[in-house]
């Protein structure tokens, strides 16, 4: 046989054949029950035009196997073909049947049994059989490279491989008692496979690549670590209800059609690629299973109401939601954690969200058990959360809803040095909970922002100081404090017991272990992110007075815990300093807590129209703990005097000139000829 087997397919066969040797189990159907074609180990994958290195004495071919095509016409039962190495190639069409063609070298058709068993790799362009066929053994495989093949009495694929390869390759399997055990099903390079009558995939690997399709209309379940991989192709299992303890991977826009799939207990479901969308409308159970969605992919399971998440292992997180990806579970109201099953599993389940990953949940979802929920890279949870006492929320991200905390909130967590958690709704902190904050160094501060109402009903706060604050003159002690609030909260506060309010709106519980004033000031000074100083374009009226005033504003946002000095300069434009305006020179210093500074400048007005004029103000620099935002602003002085009306000179109308009278033409007078001067001579 020629060595035209594509390397990727060959690698798949070798890999899964090796895996099958490790996990092989006895076939459910005895090999002795097959009394048909038995091609033994003598046929190998030799070089040249066909199968090489075999002898007639090692063959038992009671059924009729014939072929026509490039390798000539012949029978496997004809010794002349074997000795002349005239065997089927990938360009031949092979037929397995019962009718003897009457060739003198063929065996008697009366010896044909019920089925055909093949133990070696066979590569053909087309095969047609009315007999049941069995491919068995770790080294057995059937590869179809073209044409429309039909197996009309089923197929036993036990510890063997089946490949349909090429845009013209079509295989239809119908009828019979089909089995698929510990083997490999492959459709690649446009190959199409439709296999009816197959009910269960048992320890099977199914692989479909771009442009290829596998349809298994009667499969109801997959068990014993079966795997399905769809890489740009289509896999249709419309009747599959359960896929237990296996792996389902959809990549690069592949399509998995499994509308009835309800039970995925222990199964790893993965989607990867921006055009990959996996919709599982009936999925109701994925206990101890895993989701992994990455690189812009989407997994949707609307019917999932409650789930028990398996604990993490040394090589796998429980759930993973990666860059720009979406895991949509809009019906999920309860997440619990299963106990570890052995030392290979961690004690907690871990859901990781990264790079704008999004998890859509029900309106309110309760999380119980040892769950670590880690967010990073602007990840987002859509829905409200109730965190149980054993749950940990860490990292940076947004809870687009309310947050009710009885567990631990630790923005730094295990995977990021500092974090910011934003809650768009209300926040409730309950007795027994903990907020663990890390503070220290420039721009190093764990933060929790609440845009709704914060109700502090108890709990504790642990503040850990590092870097510059550890060496400060009056550092805030490391320890556990009764929960307090500070100026970064955006909403209102209620606490039990009542808080002691300060004039700036911050407060602390009356049960604090430290004096309220000193503690709040300590928290304020430990906000170490920079203040942002910025300006924006402004417009003022000129006015008629010789001197009026405009108020240019420099804005400030951030902690505002230290004084900030700002240097600026004025850049003349169509407005000239001294003639149109007078602007004071800098610098200026903003006090702690001062959100803006108005700079009064002189506008020189008049009653003469000159048109709008403008100049610019540029922020040059800021002192320590400040940074520039928008640093250049245009100031326009709008002309409010009316424009002079233009003088329009009247244009004289042209006087029409009378038409010239024609000169009279004198009448013509007949001219008489002059009389000749006659000289009269007297005689």
Image (cartoon, rainbow, N blue to C red):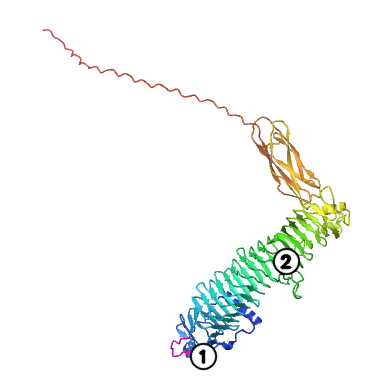
Q: Is residue 142 left or right of residue 465?
A: left
Where residue 380 appears, as percent x and y from the top left, is: 70, 59
Query: Tag 1, which secondary structure?
Result: helix
Magenta: main secondary structure equals: loop
Magenta highlight range: 98-109
The structure residue drawn at horizontal position 50% and vertical position 90%, both measured from the top left corner, is 111
| Residue occupying the far bottom of the picture | 57
| Residue occupying the far top of the picture | 683
Tally of numbered discs: 2
| Magenta stretch: includes residue 108 | yes
Location of residue 556 with respect to 657 vertically, above or below: below
Where residue 95 appears, as percent x and y from the top left, is: 48, 82
Where residue 578 appears, as percent x and y from the top left, is: 71, 34
Image quadrant in which the C terminus is located: top left
Query: Tag 2, which secondary structure?
Result: strand
Judging by the rendered image, the residue that carries numbered circle 2 is 335
Q: Is residue 87 left or right of residue 669?
A: right
Judging by the rendered image, the residue that carries numbered circle 1 is 56
Where residue 652 appears, as percent x and y from the top left, is: 49, 24
230 or 472, nearer to the observer: 230
State whether residue 45 appears in this view: no
> Of label 2 and label 1, which has the lower sequence position?
1
Location of residue 416 with respect to 576 vertically, above or below: below
596 or 176, nearer to the observer: 176
| Magenta stretch: includes residue 317 | no
| Residue occupying the far left of the picture | 683
Q: Residues within 10 Å of mark 1 (few under 14, many from 20)?
A: some
Disc assigned to residue 562: none
> Dividing the picture into quarters, in which one does residue 410 lie?
bottom right
> Dividing the picture into quarters, in which one does residue 670 lie?
top left
> Dividing the picture into quarters, in which one does residue 254 lie?
bottom right
Q: CA distance from mark 2 to mark 1?
A: 65 Å
């Amino acid at each position: 046989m020629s060595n035209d087997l594509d390397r990727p397919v060959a690698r798949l066969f070798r890999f899964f054949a090796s895996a099958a040797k490790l996990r092989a189990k006895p076939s459910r159907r005895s090999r002795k029950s097959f009394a048909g074609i038995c091609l033994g180990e003598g046929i190998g994958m030799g070089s040249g035009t066909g199968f090489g290195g075999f002898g007639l004495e090692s063959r038992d071919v009671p059924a009729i196997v014939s072929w026509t095509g490039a390798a000539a016409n012949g029978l496997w039962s004809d010794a002349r073909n074997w000795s002349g190495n005239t065997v089927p190639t990938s360009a031949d069409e092979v037929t397995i049947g019962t009718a003897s063609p009457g060739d003198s070298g063929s065996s008697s058709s009366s010896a044909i049994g019920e089925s055909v068993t093949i133990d070696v790799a066979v590569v053909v362009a087309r095969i047609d059989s009315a007999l049941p066929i069995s491919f068995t053994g770790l080294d057995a495989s059937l590869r179809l490279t073209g044409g429309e093949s039909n197996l009309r009495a089923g197929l036993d694929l036990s510890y063997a491989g089946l490949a349909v390869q090429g845009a013209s390759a079509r295989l239809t399997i119908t009828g019979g008692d089909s089995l698929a055990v510990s083997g490999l099903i492959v459709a690649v390079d446009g190959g199409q496979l439709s296999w009816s009558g197959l009910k269960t995939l048992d320890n099977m690997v199914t692989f479909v690549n771009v442009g290829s399709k596998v349809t298994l209309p009667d499969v109801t379940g997959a068990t014993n670590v079966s795997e399905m991989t769809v890489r740009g192709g289509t896999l249709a299992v419309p009747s599959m209800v359960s896929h237990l303890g296996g792996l389902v991977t959809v990549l690069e826009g592949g399509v998995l059609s499994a509308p009835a799939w309800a039970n995925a207990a222990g199964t790893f479901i993965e989607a990867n690629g921006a055009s990959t969308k996996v919709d599982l409308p009936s999925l109701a159970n994925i206990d101890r299973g895993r989701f992994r969605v990455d690189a812009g992919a989407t997994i949707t399971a609307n019917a999932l109401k409650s789930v028990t998440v398996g604990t993490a292992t040394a090589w796998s997180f429980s759930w993973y939601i990666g860059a720009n990806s979406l895991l949509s579970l809009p019906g999920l109201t309860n997440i619990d954690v299963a106990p570890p099953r052995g030392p290979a599993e961690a004690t907690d389940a871990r859901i990781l969200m990264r790079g704008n990953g999004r998890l859509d949940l029900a309106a309110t979802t309760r999380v119980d058990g040892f769950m670590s929920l880690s967010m990073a890279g602007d990840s987002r949870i859509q829905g409200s959360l109730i965190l149980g006492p054993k749950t940990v929320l860490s990292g940076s991200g947004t809870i687009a809803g309310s947050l009710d905390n009885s567990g631990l909130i630790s923005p730094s967590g295990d995977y990021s040095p500092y974090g910011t958690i934003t809650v768009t709704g209300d926040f409730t902190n309950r007795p027994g909970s903990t907020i663990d904050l890390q503070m220290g160094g420039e721009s190093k501060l764990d933060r929790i922002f609440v845009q709704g109402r914060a109700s502090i009903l108890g709990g504790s706060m642990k503040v850990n100081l590092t870097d510059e604050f550890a060496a400060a003159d009056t550092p805030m002690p490391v320890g556990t404090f009764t929960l307090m609030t500070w100026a970064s909260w955006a909403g209102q506060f209620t606490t039990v017991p009542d808080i002691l309010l300060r004039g700036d709106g911050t407060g602390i519980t009356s049960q604090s272990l430290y004096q309220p004033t000193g503690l709040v000031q300590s928290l304020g000074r430990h906000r170490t992110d920079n203040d942002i100083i910025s300006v924006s374009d402004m417009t003022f009226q000129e006015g008629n007075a010789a001197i009026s005033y405009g108020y240019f504003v420099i804005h400030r946002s951030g902690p505002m815990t230290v004084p900030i000095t700002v240097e600026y300069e004025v850049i003349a434009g169509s407005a000239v300093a001294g003639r149109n305006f007078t602007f004071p020179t800098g610098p200026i210093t903003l006090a702690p807590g001062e959100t803006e500074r108005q700079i009064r400048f002189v506008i020189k007005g008049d009653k003469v129209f000159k048109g709008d004029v403008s100049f610019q103000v540029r922020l040059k620099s800021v002192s320590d703990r400040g940074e520039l935002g928008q640093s250049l602003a245009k100031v326009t002085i709008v002309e409010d005097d009316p424009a002079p009306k233009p003088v329009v000179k009247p244009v004289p109308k042209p006087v029409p000139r009378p038409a010239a009278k024609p000169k009279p033409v004198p009448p013509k007078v007949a001219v008489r000829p002059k009389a000749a001067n006659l000289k009269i001579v007297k005689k």
